[in-house]
Image (cartoon, grey):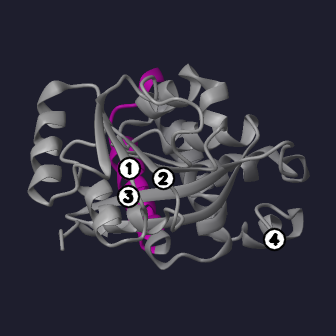
């Protein structure tokens, strides 16, 4: 049985059993191999923009004897998959701006999937904001700590109408985008550790800035750090607001 990293195993665990999978940016093809080999999912598309990673994926797929169940395709995002070919799509292990580009490139095709499993490596708040503003619902979230880094990930469903985000104040919506509404609501222990670490780092940055000669740029930077601190500290008290608003019930 193929062995996955802690991060990839957490991503794979979010895929619904029985769904045909489309893995965007598959790299070595490990997640499709793992899911098909385990019998959790019947078949998969392993897609990547570059020939090199796709060749490695093809070698791995062949090595595990899964050529009849996992297809490989050169693809820019979901360009090479047709509507109805797959039910679950994974977009993981890439920057948030690239994730957003893929989400926006073929909106109708993207909404044809029954679920999206997303794991952006940066700009996570921008991805979450796009989802809540474009009729997607986060139904599961997790955060993994591995090799000194924190990795948030979420399972998303396309929905016909927006969740009741209007019941939350703007500050609370920003905090949800930054840290994840379900991670906050459920008191995720890894998120708690991340918040503590971030708080210490922000306080240290502010202290070092305050020791420097005061300039306009330093003053602006201090205000930015203080705003980040305010969001960080609000995360501890926002759980009740999320529950009362009915977010992701």
Tell me the CA gap for discs 4 and 2.
Answer: 33 Å
Q: Are marks 1 and 3 in contact (CB under 8 Å)?
A: no
Tell me the CA gap for discs 4 and 3.
Answer: 24 Å
Which region is colored magenta?
A: 193-217
- The quarter holding residue 215 reads top left
Q: Nearer the viewer, mark 1 or mark 3?
A: 1
Where's residue 94, x and y in %? 34, 39
Where's residue 187, x and y in %? 60, 77
Where's residue 90, x and y in %? 44, 47
Closer-to-camera residue (162/112):
112
Tell me the CA gap for discs 1 and 2.
Answer: 6 Å
Tell me the CA gap for discs 1 and 3.
Answer: 24 Å
In the rendered picture of this protein, how many numbered marks are placed on residues? 4
Residue located beneath label 1 in the image? 44
Q: Main secondary structure of the magenta part?
A: helix
Residue located beneath label 4 in the image? 243
Residue located beneath label 2 in the image? 20
Residue located beneath label 3 in the image? 151
Q: Earlier in the sequence, mark 4 or mark 2?
A: 2
Q: Earlier in the sequence, mark 1 or mark 2?
A: 2
């Amino acid at each position: 049985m193929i062995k996955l990293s802690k991060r990839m195993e957490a991503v794979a665990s979010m895929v619904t059993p029985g769904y045909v999978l489309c893995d965007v940016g598959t790299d070595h093809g490990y997640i499709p191999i793992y899911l098909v080999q385990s019998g959790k999912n019947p078949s998969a598309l392993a897609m990547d923009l570059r020939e090199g990673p796709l060749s490695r994926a093809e070698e791995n797929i062949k090595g595990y004897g899964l050529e009849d169940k996992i297809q490989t395709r050169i693809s820019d995002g979901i360009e090479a998959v047709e509507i109805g070919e797959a039910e679950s799509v994974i977009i993981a292990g890439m920057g948030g701006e690239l994730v957003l580009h893929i989400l926006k490139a073929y909106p109708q095709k993207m909404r044809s999937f029954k679920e999206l499993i997303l794991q952006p490596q940066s700009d996570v708040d921008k991805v979450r904001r796009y989802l809540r503003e474009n009729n997607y619902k986060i139904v599961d979230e997790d955060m993994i700590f591995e090799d000194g880094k924190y990795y948030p990930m979420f399972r998303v469903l396309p929905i016909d109408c927006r969740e009741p985000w209007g019941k939350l104040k703007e500050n609370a919506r920003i905090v949800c985008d930054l840290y994840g509404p379900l991670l906050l609501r459920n008191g995720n222990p890894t998120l708690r550790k991340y918040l503590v670490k971030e708080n210490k780092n922000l306080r240290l940055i502010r202290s070092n800035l305050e020791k420097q000669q005061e300039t306009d740029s330093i003053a602006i930077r201090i205000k930015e750090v203080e705003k980040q601190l305010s969001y960080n500290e609000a995360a501890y008290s926002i759980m009740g607001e999320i529950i009362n608003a009915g977010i992701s019930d």
